[in-house]
Image: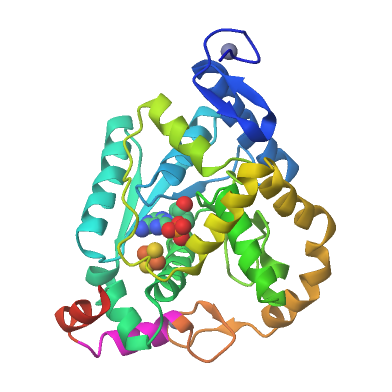
Amino acid sequence: MKCTVCKGPAVIDVRRHNANFCADHFLKLVRDQVGKAIKDFAMLTRDDRALVAVSGGKDSLAVWDILLELGYAADGLYLGLGIGDYSDASGEMARSFASSRGLRLIEVDLPTDHGFDIPTGAKAARRVPCSACGLSKRHLFDEAARTGGYDVVVTGHNLDDEAAVLFGNVLHWQTDYLGRQLPVLPARHGFPRKVKPLVRLGEREMAAYCVLRGIDYIVEECPMADGNKHLGYKEALNAIEATSPGTKHDFYFGFLARASDRFTPDAETEQSNLGACSRCGAPTTGEVCAFCRLAERATAIPVALGREGGAR
Ligand code: AMP
Ligand code: FES
Ligand code: ZN
Ligand code: ZN
């Protein structure tokens, strides 16, 4: 297998591009794809202060590394979600990446700072763990960006993630979610701008990027992911991609180019009803935001009890 660019020995094939790459040209491809996403969707400027949400996984550590390589100013944010050993190990990955490169990593710990962990929160709210987890993460990202004076929150969502979420939203015709499923959400109503610079790259490419760059990341999946529907959607899309490379890209980018606008009014209706949470000041459609309601219920349960029931 030869590199399509320089004819040297290739280390990876990217079937979607019908091409093979040596290590140097693969790293260049990844940076170019991120640069193109940033430019096409006007995600970031050199003057922005960016906060990269890092989970200790391959995508978010890679996007932090790539943004710095491309010359953007970016600090990291790690949220300790209290998911047992998994959280301890993922926090270690984020910390060692930051300290080995002299980077600033902000840490927020849900149990210490808000008095509950995800297993307890999910149990108290009778939600599936990922729902309590997603809600808490979004809230804490926004809060950390506001407190730290950051212009933009960067996440490591890649093409596989976005195509799977889109697939789920289409299967259930979640039109308000479809109206908001963009690689850039502008700052408004008190929310910081949110960007996903990895939308042009897949999971396999991000893993290869980390290996080639010597980035150590947590390989295990979250132990609470059982029953997460997106894993099933990813498998279904992978089966299609295996016989028709490029389908995921066409599905997601075709949606952005030709369909997403049509759902903007559905998303706007919800946004126009936003006020400030009476407890924490975060934007919300109710009197008290979903995070404060979750925290209230979760802190009514002793942490150890909730964890026992929720982590199964
Ligand atoms: P997930 O929802 O786990 O697929 O993660 C999506 C993105 O959210 C990741 O790529 C990270 O940017 C961010 N993220 C997930 N977990 C954490 C965490 N514990 N702390 C900070 N950011 C996170
Ligand atoms: Fe959903 Fe961890 S809580 S994957
Ligand atoms: Zn090459
Ligand atoms: Zn609140």
Rendered position, 16 above or below 24: below
**How are the colours assigned in the image?**
rainbow
Q: Which residues are magenta?
A: 291-301
**Would residue 5 be visible to someone looking at this image?**
yes
Residue 157 location (% of width, % of height): 53, 52
Quadrant hosting residue 104: top left
Q: Quadrant of the N terminus?
A: top right
Residue 300 magenta: yes
Name which residue lies at 50% across and 49% down. Answer: 156
**Quadrant including the C terminus:** bottom left
At horizontal 53% and vertical 46% (from top left) the residue drawn is 49
Q: Position of residue 45 (x, y in %)?
A: 64, 41
Camera-nearest residue between 167 and 198: 167
Compared to residue 159, the image places residue 190 above or below, namely below
Quadrant of ligand 4: it is bottom left
> Does residue 18 lie above or below 287 as drawn?
above
Q: Which one is in front, 238 or 161?
A: 238
Residue at 24 percent across and 71 percent down: it is: 111
Q: Using residue 162 as the reference point, say whether residue 176 is left or right of it.
A: right
| Residue 3 covered by magenta stretch | no
Among all residues in the image, which is located at the extreme front? Answer: 243
What residue is at 27 percent from the left and 79 percent from the top? Answer: 120
